[in-house]
Image (cartoon, helix red, strand yellow):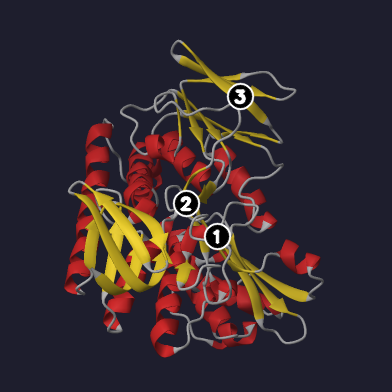
Amino acid sequence: MTFDLIVIGAGPGGYVASIRAAQLGLKVACIEKESLPGGTCLRVGCIPSKALLESSEKYVDLVNGLEEHGIEVGDVRLNLHKMMQRKERIVETLSMGVNGLLRKNKVKYFHGTARLEGPGKVLVTGASGKTAIEANRIILATGSRPTFLPGVEPDGQRIGTSNEALGYEEVPPRLIVIGAGYIGMELGSVWNRLGSEVTVLEYLDRILPGMDFDLSEAALKIFEKQGMKFNLGCRVTGARTEGEEVIVECKGQNPVKADRVLLAVGRKANTEGLNLSGAGIEMNERGQIEVDDHFQTSAENVYAIGDLIRGPMLAHKAEEEGIACVEQFVNGYGHVNYNAIPGIVYTHPEIASVGKTEEQLREERVTYNKGEFPFSANGRARALGSTEGKVKILADRKTDRILGVHIIGPRAGDLIAEAAIAIEFSASAEDLARSIHAHPTLAEAVREAALAVDERSIHS
């Protein structure tokens, strides 16, 4: 079978690239080895974790968060099995939706593993055997998989990754989370809310590396207040199971014991079985595929996007790269603004960031002005009963152009969209400050922070 384009991987980057290519008139094949399309994000990542975060937050509200609203609740019980069933229904529904979108756009879907067999050639191995297909162009979009630590071997039971932590059959009395990044903080929050004693071990001296330090520092205090324990500057050297316990060894410190361990130290490009070396595709020292500014690999007419290449491992980044990649095939132009890609931690409160951090601006010797506004001074946040956190805007001192926006507070993940648009359109802090924001809304905090850049915030 011959196609205009073969996409290997049906995660956010792969299925979006397939659909956009089909919309542009290309004959497209999409290959996925898992039972359902959607990739890690949909099946064992973004979507199931957010479902559990939402459910666990409602549980915490019922247990101890509604009394100040004048709502008294009796005996609250946790039905973890039902919570997990809800998560699975959401995942299945969305996966079937992706299936439907591929059919609607006449994308030929193959369930199986893919291997590059030569210029323009791919061998698909599935339940019904092997199928050879060809195309003018190939996009690699196979995503990423968890990274392991030397001495910490996941066993799928006591020691596991996010895959296992999304499906514990009971709340572990004690949970050790190794790694204080996005995944560790989100899943640590879930099980902390549901009653687990959570201890986070982090090699660095801070949590949420890569986020603006000011926000990560504020987040640490909030998470500690919520009951999570942190051991920063901790180098984990090993983990072993002894009976019903897991013992985690840390260099120069006493061992830490728990019932389960969640290994969340990052992810790496998932290139296994693709035959990249045989296809002449070059990799970098981090195990990622090297591409040029048009996503072209070192092999002619083979492209790569998403977690396989440089940049943040985020679903929306992969989607935009998939669209840009196929649009350049047809229209001759495709572009991703990497300065306008937001990152969100879906804890409570949420933490969201887009653009440059203060640390990056100092390192690059860029002079800037800073405006901040606390949610404690926002009427809507007061009404919600969620006043922790703030909005921080960084703007170029000479031009007032917005360089970065960082938010910790209620619904920060939604509020950051306004900031991403502002950066995409090269808006100034003055532009944001002059835009009328409805009252009373959380978004007013963004406007007040923009006003504060010029030291003229009204409500602080």
The Cα–Cα distance between marks 1 and 3, rounded to whole angstroms, is 30 Å
Q: Looking at the image, which residue is at 20% across and 55% down?
A: 93
Closer to the chain start, of discs 1 and 3, is 3
Label located before the other in sequence (1 or 2): 2
Specify whether 105 is left or right of 258.
left
Residue 457 in view in this figure? no
Return the mark for residue 418. none
Res 427 → quadrant: bottom right
Question: Which marked residue is nearer to the observer: mark 3 or mark 2?
Answer: 2
**Element type at marker 1?**
loop
Is 329 placed left or right of 226 in the picture?
A: left
| For residue 402, side relative to residue 379 (left or right) | right
For disc 2, the neighbor class at 10 Å (few under 14, some 14 to 19, many from 20) is: some
- The disc labelled 1 sits on which kind of residue? Ile
Q: Which residue is mark 3?
A: 238
Classify mark 2: helix, strand or loop.
loop
Q: Is residue 196 left or right of residue 281?
A: left
Q: Judging from the image, what secondary structure is the residue with disc 3 in?
A: strand
Question: Quick one: quadrant of the N terminus?
Answer: bottom left
Answer above or below: position of 275 versus 167. below
Q: Which residue is mark 2?
A: 271
Residue at x 27% of width, y 81% of height: 23
Q: Which residue is mark 1?
A: 289
Residue 201 drawn above or below residue 414: above
At label 2, the amino acid type is Thr
Residue 422 is drawn in which quadrant?
Answer: bottom right
The x, y position of residue 275, in whole percent, is 45, 53
